[in-house]
Amino acid sequence: MKIIFIFTASGGMIMKKILILFLAALLIPAGMAAQAQITTKKVKIEDFSEKVTKIVLSGNMFYDSTLKEAVREHWTISPYEFCSLSDFQKMNTDADYYFLIKVKGQFRKESEPGIEFLSLLKGGPEASKGLDNMLELITFPYAAVESPSGRETVFLPLVLDIIQQHVLSSIATDIVAYSPLAAYSNNIGKIRGCKVVMAEEDLSSEAFRMRDRYLKDPVVVTDMDSADGYVTRHAEDVVVSYTVCPEDPEPGAFCYKMLINVGNGELYYFRKHRITRKTGPGFLIEDIKRIAEELD
């Protein structure tokens, strides 16, 4: 079974929704305030820690064994159980469950899905109308659909940490619950005082040529295996780059770029850009300039 979410590049509607919520609260007459209640996303997911999160297995033995191990070692914010895709189909309308499931994302200009995401969804009757009607807590880029690099297995524990931190923050405030993942780029100032390790494979061709100009100490540019070694060692005060894009990205596809503190699993930078005939995958010049500015 293939589960596909169709994504758009637009993120502007999120802030509009928040504004509408605030305006609606202000416009409620004082006499009706006690009776009126706006059920925000924060309110809808406040029961998360009390409900079982179903970890949906794909049927791929290698991925499932890796996922099981990572979940057992890192999932701490709710009770969990593993289930099959067929179980998910039967249970996704049940509001007593949340579901962590791997999905394929296809943007409108792509001819086929290029990236797999890990999506955390709340069960409910809306699922009968399609998965895109389920309440989404977070959908995080994980790996290329075709020929994944293998780095996704190294970074999976960190991805689970980021997902859990996001859920806890969303329960605490609607600002996080409704914000796009790009808002995590506001954390970039936290790279100060850290060793920043950039995998050569994560740099765009132009950024790689200009690396000596912008990426100076405490930034280290190294090969992918060496960079990933910091992840497996859970190195303290070390930030490592991670990118996710299709194996052979076509114009219209997206590349996701991240900086993650591998010691505490905190996301310090998250940006995406559209692949064009002139702009390929990887951290762009504008990305490495921003990193360099924070470290000056």
Image: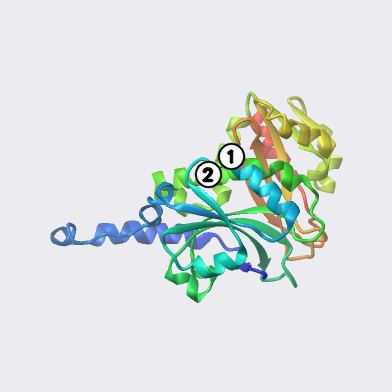
Task: Using a 10 Å C-alpha cutoff, classify the residue at mark 1 as few (fewer than 14 neighbours), some (14 to 19) or many (20 or more).
Answer: some
> Residues at badges 2 and 1 in contact (C-beta under 8 Å)?
yes
Q: Quarter-wise, where is residue 234 in the image?
A: top right
Residue 164: numbered disc: 2
Q: Secondary structure at mark 1?
A: helix
Q: Quadrant of the N terminus?
A: bottom right
Q: Position of residue 127 (x, y in %)?
A: 49, 70
Residue beneath the point at 53% across and 58% down: 99
Which one is earlier in the sequence, the residue at label 2 or at label 1?
A: 1
Front residue (pair 133, 10) = 133
Q: Quarter-wise, where is residue 288 in the image?
A: top right
Mark-to-mark CA distance, 2 and 1: 9 Å
Front residue (pair 21, 294) = 21
Q: Position of residue 274 (x, y in %)?
A: 71, 59
Front residue (pair 128, 170) = 128
Front residue (pair 47, 109) = 47
Q: Quarter-wise, where is residue 290 in the image?
A: top right
Q: Quadrant of the C terminus?
A: top right
Residue beneath the point at 81% across and 58% down: 247
Work out whether residue 283 can be spotted: no
Residue 82: numbered disc: none
Colour scheme shown? rainbow
Q: Secondary structure at mark 2?
A: helix
In the figure, is residue 196 to the left or right of 139? right
Query: Would you name the residue on which mark 1 appears?
Result: 74
In the figure, is residue 95 to the left or right of 104? left
Q: Position of residue 283 (x, y in %)?
A: 74, 46
Please name the amino acid that badge 2 sits on. Gln
Please name the amino acid that badge 1 sits on. His
Q: Position of residue 177 (x, y in %)?
A: 45, 51
- Residue pushed farthest bottom? 129
